[in-house]
Image: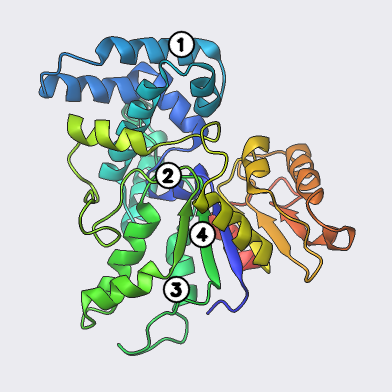
Amino acid sequence: MINKKTVFVLGAGASCPYGYPSGACLRELICFDGGFYKDYLNYYNRNKLDTNKAEINRFIKSFKDSNIKSIDVFMANNPTIAPTGKYIIAYEIFRAERNSRFGEEAKREQERLEDLQKTSNHKSYLWGTAGFQGGDWYFYLYNRILEGLIGNDALPDFSNDNITFITFNYDRSLEQFLYNSLQCLYSEVPEDKIIQILKKLKIIHVYGQIAPLKWQNQNDYVDYKQQIDEPLLECTAKNIETIYEVKENPELQEAQKLLSQAEQILFLGFGYAPENMEILKLPDRTHKATSIYGTALGLESKEKYDIRRRIKKWLPVEHLDQIEIGYLKSSDNMDCLKLLRNYL
């Protein structure tokens, strides 16, 4: 049970425990021959395609040689080939979705890949895959939400906005996990009632969602782990937007409103890029103290300090001690699961 108004702000790292790539990993997958391109060539030959190959090669070479870490920045600077970049992102999301796992399966897959990594003759097998990085925070949060709810008439209530999500990701892993978990837990409850409950939970995709699931849109949906084909890629690539294309929209305005009402904000798997922080427009909060916590996997102490200082400018002076980005004074990094266990 979570009683404080809590907003979870999700970056690419939040989906990593389930087989999705981080921002840095996405660049590696695109620029490394054994990653995206190897899988795409198999798909290309299997489907006997005669288009896109030259455009794909051009995008990969230019992105690789640009040495810019952000694919969003690269596409903003190269608008004529940006649609190819979105096509590649859509392909990588569906490829990760196809291989994704939840719960015990995700943990076992993570352990299996870690064991393989220790064996030199298996390392090539791991190149070009996203892997499963970090603890299973979906499982932990889901069980926190359901604490004290026993019986098929004791269903979670998301109508009070105590729990909301603002995600910078295009994938549907969180939505799929929650739907499937609740369906199985309340197997004697009609499906439409589960759907009604879930639709009250706000999950705002700031830059769009690759495609809705069936429970989200009965008429225009894409099943989870859908087989990849050209119509799917061409359609869903159009759902991808970048920060440089999205300035003001209803979803973004709703996200900013939720942040202004939050009692606690948790950044999970977030990269803290200045442009992404700026678009949230964290407002001054004078009516109540707001605690802010964030993961810091792979960040050094100086980087964590700089992020904390950047966040401070949005908060009144009396609130400055309520910001924790990782373990500020420790080299021990904090993933999503550790953060929830320490601060939720």
Tell me the amino acid under the disc marked 1: Ser
Which is more N-terminal, label 1 or label 2? Answer: 1
Measure the C-alpha gap from mark 2 to mark 1: 25 Å
* Mark 2 burial class by Cα count in 10 Å: few <14, some 14-19, many 20+: some
Q: How far apart are the two marked residues, 3 and 1, measured between alpha carbons?
A: 45 Å
Q: Which mark is residue 208?
A: 2
Q: Earlier in the sequence, mark 3 or mark 1?
A: 1
Q: Quadrant of residue 341?
A: bottom right
Q: CA–CA distance between discs 3 and 2?
A: 27 Å
Residue 286 point in image, percent of width and height: 81, 66
Crowd tier of the residue under label 3, counting other residues whose Cα lies within 10 Å: few below 14, some 14–19, many 20 or above: few
Q: CA distance from mark 3 to mark 4?
A: 17 Å
Q: Position of residue 2 (x, y in %)?
A: 56, 76
Question: Can you see residue 329?
Answer: no
**What is the three-letter code of the residue carrying label 4?**
Phe
* Disc 1 to disc 4, C-alpha distance: 34 Å
Residue carrying label 4: 165
Q: Secondary structure at mark 3?
A: helix
Residue that appears at 64% across and 65% down: 342
Tell me the amino acid under the disc marked 3. Answer: Asn
Q: Earlier in the sequence, mark 3 or mark 4?
A: 3
Q: Residue at x 40, y 15 (%)?
A: 60
Mark positioned earlier in the residue sequence (3 or 2): 3
User: What residue is shown at x 53% (from left), y 72% (from top)?
Assistant: 161
- Tags 3 and 1 touching, CB below 8 Å: no
Q: Which mark is residue 62?
A: 1
